């Protein structure tokens, strides 16, 4: 019986999970312009989304604001400086380098970790060598 040659398959990945590789920053740490200068939010309260956003701002946001009616069904919320902005959960800084991983291409990925490179240049070298092997085949 003839068994055809099967090339070893490797999967190269980089990842940096939010839970372990990133830290949330305060608006002050992030040099957030909305925090420094304040911001305005315009809502169309004639839409379901606009009504839900208005309800959240008024009842649950905990932020100080003034409101102006700018047209029929349109409200402008004006938030003074010094408050946490609405994108504060996106103010992040990377605290650890990415994971440079190589998986065996067969089987479940969960159980197929082949190598976790400690340095990015070793991962790049491994990747290059793998590409060279593919080109030669």
Image (cartoon, grey):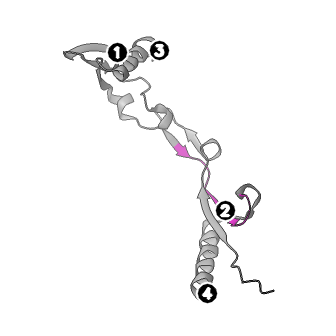
Quarter of the image with the C terminus is bottom right
Q: Which mark is residue 120?
A: none
State yes or no: discs 4 and 2 in contact (Cβ < 8 Å). Answer: no
Magenta stretch: residue 107 in it? yes
Q: Earlier in the sequence, mark 2 or mark 1?
A: 1
Picture residue at 19% right of the left edge, 15% below the top? 72
Q: Which mark is residue 137?
A: 4
Whichever of labels 4 and 1 marks the residue nearer the N terminus, that label is 1
> What is the distance, in whole Å, between disc 4 and disc 3 at their CAs?
62 Å
Residue 55 x, y percent position in the rendering: 40, 14
Q: Residues within 10 Å of mark 3 (few under 14, many from 20)?
A: few
Q: Is disc 1 surrounded by few (<14), some (14 to 19) or many (20+) residues within 10 Å?
A: some
Name the residue carrying label 2.
101
Toward the right, the furthest residue is 1
x and y, in percent, of residue 88 in the image: 47, 32
Judge the density around disc 4: few (<14), some (14-19), many (≥20) Cα neighbours within 10 Å. few
x and y percent of residue 130 in the render? 63, 78
Dot placed on the residue nearer the N-terminal end, 4 or 2: 2
Q: Is residue 69 above or below residue 108?
A: above
**Mark number for residue 60?**
3
For label 2, the SS is: strand
Q: Do the numbered discs 2 and 1 sit on residues whose CB atoms are within 8 Å?
A: no
Crowding near the residue tagged with mark 2, few <14, some 14–19, many ≥20 C-alpha atoms within 10 Å: some
Determine the CA span between mark 2 and mark 1. 48 Å
Tell me whether the residue at label 2 lies in contact with that at label 3, contact meaning CB atoms closer than 8 angstroms: no
Mark 2 or 1: the one toward you: 2
Name the residue beneath numbered marker 1: 65
Which secondary structure, mark 1? loop
Q: Is residue 47 above or below residue 120?
A: above
Give the structural element (helix, strand or loop) at label 3.
loop
Question: Residue drawn 28% across and 13% down?
Answer: 67
């Amino acid at each position: 019986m003839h068994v055809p040659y099967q090339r070893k398959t490797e999967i190269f990945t980089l990842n940096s999970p939010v839970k372990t590789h990133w830290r949330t920053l305060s608006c002050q740490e992030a040099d957030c312009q909305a925090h420094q200068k304040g911001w305005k939010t315009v809502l169309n309260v004639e839409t379901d989304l606009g009504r839900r956003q208005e309800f959240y701002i008024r009842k649950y946001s905990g932020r100080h604001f003034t409101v102006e009616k700018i047209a029929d069904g349109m409200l402008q919320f004006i938030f003074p400086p010094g408050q946490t902005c609405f994108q504060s959960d996106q103010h992040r800084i990377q605290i650890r380098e990415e994971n440079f991983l190589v998986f065996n291409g067969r089987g479940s990925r969960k159980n197929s970790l082949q190598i976790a490179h400690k340095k990015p240049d070793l991962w790049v070298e491994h990747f290059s060598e793998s590409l060279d092997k593919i080109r030669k085949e």
